[in-house]
Amino acid sequence: MNKPLRRIAIFCGLLVLALLIRDNWLQYVKADELRTHEKNRRVLIERYAQERGDIIVGGKTITGSERTTGSDFAYKRTYKNGAMWSPVTGYASQAYGATQIESIEDGILTGNDDRLFFRRTLDMVTGKKKEGGRVVTTLNAAAQKAAYEGLGSKKGAVAAIDPSTGAILALASTPSYDPSRFAGNGKADQEAWTSLESDKNKPLLNRALRETYPPGSTFKVVTAAAALEHGLYDDPDEKTDSPQPWTLPDTRTELKNEGPIQCKDVSLREALRISCNTVFGKIGSDLGKDKMLETAEKFGFNEEQFVPVRATASNFPTQMDKPQTALSSIGQFETAATPLQMAMVTSAIANDGKLMEPYMVSELQAPNLDTIERHSPKELSRPLSAGNAQQLQDMMETVVQSGTGRNAQIPGVTVGGKTGTAQHGVDNSEKPYAWFISYAKTADGSPVAVAVVVEDSDAHREDISGGGLAAPIAKNVMQAVLNGAE
Amino acid sequence: MSSTTHTSTIGAIGAPSRRNTELALLVFAVLIPIFAYANVGLAIDGTMPTGMIGYGLGLGLLAAVGHLVVRKFAPYADPLLLPLATLLNGLGLVLIWRLDQSQRLQQLQENAFGQFNPAAPNQLMYSAVGIAMFVGVLLLLKDHRILQRFTYISMIFALFLLLLPLVPGIGTDVFGAKIWIRVGGFSIQPGEFAKIVIAVFFAGYLMVKRDALALASRRFMGLYLPRGRDLGPILVIWAVSLLILIFENDLGTSLLFFGMFVVMLYVATERTSWIVIGLLMSMAGAVGVASTAGHVQARVDAWLDPFGCYATSGACEQIGQSIMAFGSGGVLGTGLGQGNSDLIGFAANADFIFATVGEELGLAGVMAFLVIYGLIIERGVRTALAARDPFGKLFAAGLSGAFALQIFVVAGGVMGLIPLTGMTMPWLAAGGSSVIANWALIGILIRISDTARRPAPAPAANPDAEMTQVVRP
């Protein structure tokens, strides 16, 4: 009986050997794949095991971390004045993932970024707990506060940029949400999330970056820039060839002006001051769609921006007939822009024609505050020459001094701007959007360009105009930046 | 076969007793779990666990009792079996205690049963009962050959044990498997004991029938096929194991029984054809059941692609969690008390306890455990080799083979090598029946090895050499 017994011994040995091989396969060959498997909760446990790094505005943190109980995720994110800052930070939720800066700079904030590898290894050897790094933003707390409080209970958005660098100073969106409310993974977090998700006012939408609105009359500055750049008119005070009434080319439809304004053959300056649809419609039509498109795209239209958070591409139609070109040139038809886009347009004009790439993360810091990466301002394009830009500034300043934008005047400061009242809805039945774009200018250039949009406010339709609703908000934002600069 | 002249691995004559070797090894077998215990406490809350002294003393006492009994009643026994079993039992206690500390499992139990009951104190008690069983076997079973007398009674008793969980009133259904009975507040898995009892029957039966099975055969396609009347028993066993599988939803036990019978049949008859027939029959049975029984089908699906059905099937989630626990452990593991193997949920300290070894002790730890199990198996087979009587050989071979199959089926199941069958990892998994039955198994192997290695009695005086008695009229 010993021969089969020896074979049984070998067979048992093979069974154990098979287990050993399987174990090596699992724990050596496949270990990394299983360790980082999407269904492996350990990845999340590890992620929330330490305090998350903070997001900084003006040297102060606008985020925090809180020890949680009753969960295997040790820490959850907290936000200081979360509703005001959520268009900047996005959210980091244990249950619902992360968005925007919280997502893009997640590696730095959790400390898992490859650039922190050496430090992490060092910490592991010295037994130090892993720490997250910090994300320093370009935002201006006072400007953000002015923007957020200015919007108040209205639905709308504000984007403010430093024209000389492209640094984003304010990025507000209302109605907003406090990301602290669903940062954990408990029942309350779930309820908060569900109610936000199903809210018809879409509080989770970052209107400053992700919503496009018909820009209405504010787009006329782009058309004006195109007219100057392509040599249609050389002087803001030169008389234009503008009949009134003016019929859209190839149609029998008359393009109407808002209100009883005199637009026949007025100069560019005057046309911008009183916001003549006929003048700018005809300019667009005279220039043709290719030239209009060229200028619009130089201002950043039809392209997504990454600040580093993705901003939706603003739209200037590429396929249009003549009447559509005319309508697009006064910010209607399919023209649509994000508040950020209109702030970029304004900033390019204020910066003497140079469009700087917008950004809001100025620096990434290691846990010990060493700089890992610093953003250096970059020129994106030159939509118009310095001379033309200065002429356009001059025109926009007239708008604020004596035109539709008088509500944005700041004593002792040169302010240029443009109002907009964009119609939308079937047969323009819905409440229009109130727009205002503006910049402030000091002796050494312009420190701030801002775009404000207010969606259907509770105000009456007649009252909605960029000058009435949006301009005061823009003024307060500019004021806040100017006060800080002094 | 039963002569003392063959060259078995363990020499029969004049072998040293090796009791001191056993004692030295036992010291390690007690110290290693104590260190592991301290390790868990330090990792979880930074202090030496308070129960450490009591636990260390308990384990040490059990080991000491085991050793003294072996020294007295089985002095020539294999010196490795007791220390290895003690080490596994000790580490099993540590692992169970470690999982008792898991917030996640405590919460799970509170939600399900309203309160949390730590498993480690019970396991220590079961270990004591297990050692008592071990001592009882050594004291009562002076010679394993006595069991030969109970061949057919064993068969009936084994079938009785197997069928107990089907009896209404005492049988309980846990997660679909009907393998437990509930008596006076205790859950007992009769299958664990039936494993040993049925080995007695197989050994006794095959010892008698092996010549008939081996020699009376026809050659067919290169295989020696047995006669129909000799084929009967194997068909009966096959049917019984299939019935267990179908009625008790216990794939593991049925596989174990059938595998054990095939192994013993092969050893008894030395006919490879039995292996081939056995394999074919088990395959046919497995395929037949897998394609009809829903829960077996689910296990097979979970084995084939645990992440494909992860969200929809509990079986898949368990396997997926188990595999991820192994993977997350990597080569060196997270260290005791620092893993998250409790994510597996309810069975984390029972069927899936090996996943905790995988995560917290890593590839190194798992290989060490597998080698320890391998050593027990090989010492068992060596005992079979050294045994002088065919009954002892068959009995030891059957027990060792069944033990090997059990390790393969459980560890292979939790590691995703084969479909999961729901059996316990000997000594590691929480559960009284398994610990007690396995201590009994070790007791029997120690008894057989003691008999095998005991110096042969001095030859009886040769009557021829004596003076011829003159019978006077």
Image: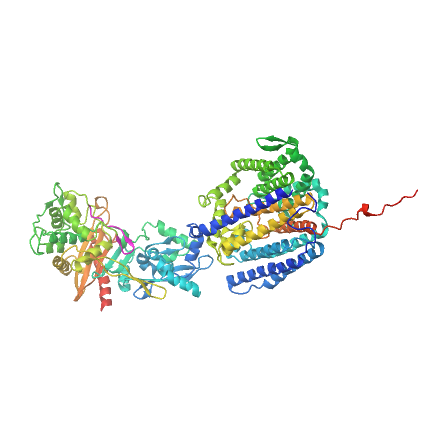
Q: What residue occupies the far bottom of the structure in this picture?
A: A486
Question: Would residue B319 be found to the left or right of residue A197 on screen?
Answer: right
x and y, in percent, of residue B215 in the image = 66, 34
Residue A379 seen in the current view? yes
Question: Would residue A75 be found to the left or right of residue A256 on screen?
Answer: right
Q: Is residue A314 magenta?
A: yes
How are the residues colored?
rainbow
Determine which quarter of the picture holds residue A413.
bottom left
All told, the count of numbered labels is 0
The quadrant of the image that shows the C terminus of chain A is bottom left
Q: Is residue B277 above or below residue A17?
A: above
Question: Would residue A133 be found to the left or right of residue B439 on screen?
Answer: left
Main SS of the magenta part reads loop
Q: Residue at x 45, y 50 (%)?
A: A29
x and y, in percent, of residue B112 in the image = 53, 51
- Of A111 and B60, nearer the camera is B60
- Of A385 and A408, nearer the camera is A385
- Of B153 and B348, nearer the camera is B153
Residue A185 seen in the current view? no
- Of A478 and A386, nearer the camera is A386
The quadrant of the image that shows the N terminus of chain A is top right
x and y, in percent, of residue A54 in the image = 35, 62
Q: Is residue B397 magenta?
A: no
x and y, in percent, of residue A209 in the image = 27, 54
Q: Which residues are magenta?
A: A305-317
Determine which quarter of the picture holds residue A384.
bottom left
Q: Residue at x 75, y 51 (%)?
A: B458
